Image (cartoon, rainbow, N blue to C red):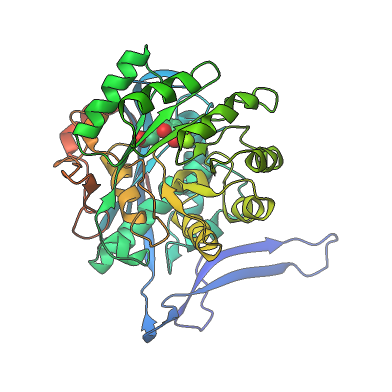
Amino acid sequence: MRIDCGLRDWIIEDWAFTPHASIGQAMRFSINLQRRDPEILNAAGVVRLPGMRIDEVRLFDVRLPLVRPFETSFGRIDAREFVLVAVDAGGATGWGECVADVDPFYSEETTTTAWYVMTNVLVPAILGRTLAHPRDAAATWARVRGHRMAKAAIEMAIWDVRARLDGRPLCELLGAAARPIPAGVSIGIQPSLAALVDRVGAELADGYRRIKIKIKPGWDRAPVEAIRAKFDRVPLMVDANAAYTVASAGALAPLDAFDLMMIEQPLDYDDLVDHARLQASLRTPICLDESITGPKAATDAIGLGACRIINIKPGRMGGFGPSIAVHDIARAHGMPVWHGGMLESGIGRAHNLHLSTLPGFTLPGDVAASRRYFVPDLIDPPIEVRKDGCIDVPPGPGIGVVPVEARLAAATQHSERFSA
Ligand code: OSB
Ligand code: MG
């Protein structure tokens, strides 16, 4: 159906008939209009931002074996399975990586729920739409509750395609500029204290700036003590992935003696109040990961005193839009943030590096080199750590990297294509 509304610069986004109760009453016809070429104001004055039409979305169900198993308080994994997203708009392709895992342990979402909600809800809602800005993707899905990792993967691909269409690096579109990103490592639970100390030594030899170890009840004080005994002053932190309860959190008090940078997410994912009580009893800063699901949670956590540091993962927040908002809220409160990791392939890793260029990211992130996880990575060249422990943001338009076609094909278990 074609409707000429006589407004040349406007496009019809949505339309609907609203039938009234009784025959004879008028039917109401509603349309949503959107400017085809909206004008946006920036510091330099008025600039024209051409809209981008979402022409095609491709989804890939990918499985990549891990270089070594990764064990957390959730359990142990040998491979990473994830949904990779390609969005075509205006003749360019943007890439996104969904960080949901096979099991609903870190969050409620899984690869299967992400696939379901993308194919049945998110992709149909956005296909054929013309967006003025990547932030507008979120409004398209405003009615969809949760599923932030699924939303983020598509939203981030749209940011990538926008930056590629503009011919500039993603970090500039996000509001920053490329700079070397200080990198830290996340070390899983190890079979023994000796194995842990060896791993820490190997990571420090590779140049990494700080060490994070996973802890759980029964594997907390001893591993920290063992690392401190061998590497006296190394910047060190621990991540519990919500493995403690109010009853068992007493085991964390002795960690105050080890000058840790932070204790990440000791208590449950939805429990800000008990984190605030625990923080009041600890000298060591609490950093929240799982609990910070967006700007509202960040504001509440800061207001309650539930943490002194925030870990930002765009997948957990629903994309770059809310991640920038959380960054800005933390910065306004003088609270440091750092970029978390979800064992991403090079695509997600590149996104993380671009976001990490924002000025509030003052602590080293979980943004390590490709070869700690995947050999080969989906991308080529892989992401490498420099001798000084920093990682360079991939240069070039967008995120600066694309998957190697043959590698993506080999790692893909199933794929689907949706065209407008
Ligand atoms: O809690 O930060 C976490 C990996 C999967 C799920 C949750 C977490 C992690 C990590 C690994 O700690 C970080 C990385 O990608 O190096
Ligand atoms: Mg964490």
**Nearest the camera: 323 or 54?**
323
Image quadrant where residue 346 sits? top left
From the viewer's perspective, is 180 left or right of 259?
left
**Nearest the camera: 380 or 155?**
380
Residue at the image point whose x is 52% and y is 30% from the top: 255
In this orientation, does residue 74 appear?
A: no
From the viewer's perspective, is 67 left or right of 224?
left
Residue at the image point whose x is 53% and y is 27% from the top: 104
Q: Is residue 56 above or below residue 264?
A: below
In this orientation, does residue 411 appear?
A: yes
Q: Percent position (x, y) of residue 4?
A: 51, 77
Q: Is residue 121 above or below residue 2?
A: above
Residue at the image point whose x is 39% and y is 55% from the top: 362
Image quadrant where residue 303 sits? bottom right
Image quadrant where residue 347 sits? top left
Q: Percent position (x, y) of residue 60?
A: 34, 35
Q: Percent position (x, y) of residue 355?
A: 36, 55
Q: Residue furthest top?
A: 191
**Nearest the camera: 187 or 18?**
187
Q: Percent position (x, y) of residue 415?
A: 34, 33
